[in-house]
Amino acid sequence: MTARYKRMFDALKQEGRGAFIPFVMLGDPDMAESLAILKTLAASGADALELGIPFSDPIADGPTIQTAANRALASGATPTKCLDLVAAFRKEYPDLPIGLLVYANLVIGRGIDAFYEHAAKCGVDSVLVADAPTAESGDFLAGARKHGVAPVYIVPPNADEAAMKKISEICEGYTYLLGRAGVTGAESEMNAPLDARVKYLGEQGAPPVVVGFGISRPNHVATAIRAGAGGAISGSATVRIVEKNLGDRKKMHRELAAFVQNMLAATKA
Amino acid sequence: MEIRHGAFGRFGGMFVPEILVPTLEQLERAFEDASADAAFAAELDGLLREYAGRETPLYRCRNLTEGTKATIFLKREDLLHGGAHKTNQVIGQALLARRMGKTRLIAETGAGQHGVATALAGALFKMKTRVYMGSKDMARQAPNVYRMRLMGTEVVPVETGSCSLKDAINEALRDWSESYENTHYLLGTVAGPHPFPTIVREFQRVIGREAKRQMIEATGRLPDYAVACVGGGSNAIGLFADFIDEPDVRLVGVEPAGHGLHTEKHGATLEKGRPGILHGSYSYVLQDEDGQIVESHSVSAGLDYPGVGAQHSHLMETGRAEYVGITDDEALAAFGLLSRTEGIIPALESAHALAHALKIARDATRETVILVNLSGRGDKDIEQTMPYTKLEVNEYDRKI
């Protein structure tokens, strides 16, 4: 559903700032704590949430998010339970845009149509399938459209104009622009030049650009916003706070809140 | 599932992160160009002949099938330089890598045979080479780890997931997502995203092409069966490719049944899996009801993989090929038996194919000719099999 994203980007425009969107893994470290983490992120002012469903073989993810997926799977997370968790959260936050980041085999596991139907029912706004690129988007795109879920696609640093044009045509909600090559991780910082791609995507009518991969500090957010992006996503850096504080849950929530607020402070244009 | 790239019936595709798509398209173009280039074919043929030792012999077993009505012919890919069929396609892909201007090779390996083949190509073509290998496989295939390192390849242990082939492929794909500009991912099997299943098949096709001609020269006819082991499925596709249009030849792929198909300890993807997306293609996958990939098991590291090449899924569903399971114990018995009766020590992977061929031989009620792809040699498996073989050999003796 693109309406929540649209309302968010419109409101941010009025405020003269971009979006900060933290990513965490659903079910990490367990289902109950995961729900509490989502609430902390939202209560701290996150403009939207990007949420992963844990998969056994996440080829687009670096060690931090792989480990988070393993923790979630070990605690019994399943795609169904994760979506139910989103539904529970949605009841308390009816307006916050929620995106899912999933792997193709989990989408087709119980049927593509059933997956998108369930996701829509649970209040999911967008779905990015990490290993279903535009070149093989067929059934995923159809499923998303049928159930009013915004299909999100990634613009990598090596995308040529034809690829960016194609993405601009089919992407809804927001456009996920990679800040660098590689897999997710806070170990290496974003380094790809953003300005030209942000501008070109805008000209092609792509939905607002959000930069992800290698966003771990406020200055990365500021760089993305300065380049004309509508926001930034930070995954591994957020997940690391969860990982670092597994033994002290109070501290985990305190640090998550402080992290979101610091990153938000860098979203002023 | 709609498949837009590299479809084999309803299987195949290019299900990878967006960042790998331009690189795979570049590879597809390079392969198409090379296929139309006589100089490329000449260089590949020359290297396969002078460097790798093609053509490989077709050997009629003298003693193995004594007392049965069957004859078993072995396509001796174990005699290929590097010790397995892997070298065929590695040289082809290394030439493609050079053609694309890439200077670095990465690869995954299970048993270490593909890693060894990539290592020798890295040395030959002066390319920096890194091989990802599950730590479990490094322990059970130590001689191959040494061989790779001896040839100047960096072997990186993979400690994630099942610490096996599947996880090594994950790691290689992650590396490639960052390194694609100067690096070619030399995928070792007919699984993976388009165009790998096609490229690897075309470079392995030489196995069946030679074997077909050699069979006709030796016997004046085609075999009744063509049998090969299937992990990812490259040696099987290589053997099958030129027989697919010969309806009288039964194509049999042999999967690792591990402790038995009734247990959870096996790697019989086609027999026990269901369609899913793993490592870039839609094909049969061993997975749980939610779609999480489950760990496979086999005594043979090269077959220990929960996925399979998309074309095999298609060959199975259309009925053109049949797929059966051979347990660890049966493979070990065949391993010992071939060693003792013919003086040929097969790779544990190939021993799976051989074990099934022996079953066919035992059951044959009329003259039957069985072509087996002896895809690799067993030196790498000596240490691992030592504790098992003696008993099993005697047991198999009685059955024959």
Image (cartoon, coloured by chain):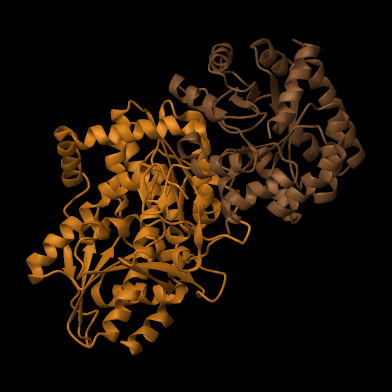
Chain colours: A brown, B orange
Is B231 on the left-hand or right-hand side of B57? right
- Residue situated in front as seen by the camera: B317 or B107: B317
* Residue A7 or residue B141, whichever sits in front: A7
Query: Compared to A263, does B6 lie above or below?
Result: below
Give how far across and how far down residue B157 sits, in percent.
Answer: 54, 46
Residue sitting at 29 percent across and 54 percent down? B85
Residue B356 appears at what percent x and percent y? 34, 75
Q: Residue at x 26, y 81 (%)?
A: B361
Q: Percent x, y for residue B92?
A: 27, 41
Vertical relation: B375 (above or below) B105:
below
Q: Residue at x 68, y 10 (%)?
A: A226
* Residue at the image point whose x is 28% and y is 41% from the top: B91
Count the marks.
Answer: 0
Please provide percent x and percent y for residue A67.
Answer: 69, 44
- A182 horizontally vs B4: left or right: right
**Residue that protrudes farthest toward the right in the picture:** A250
Is residue A245 visible in the rendered structure shown here? no
Residue in front for this viewpoint, A85 or B279: A85
Please state, as top left, top right, bottom left or bottom right, where the C terminus of chain B lies in the image: bottom left
> Is B264 drawn above or below residue B160 in the view shown?
below
Q: Quadrant of residue A35?
A: top right
Viewer can see residue B283: yes
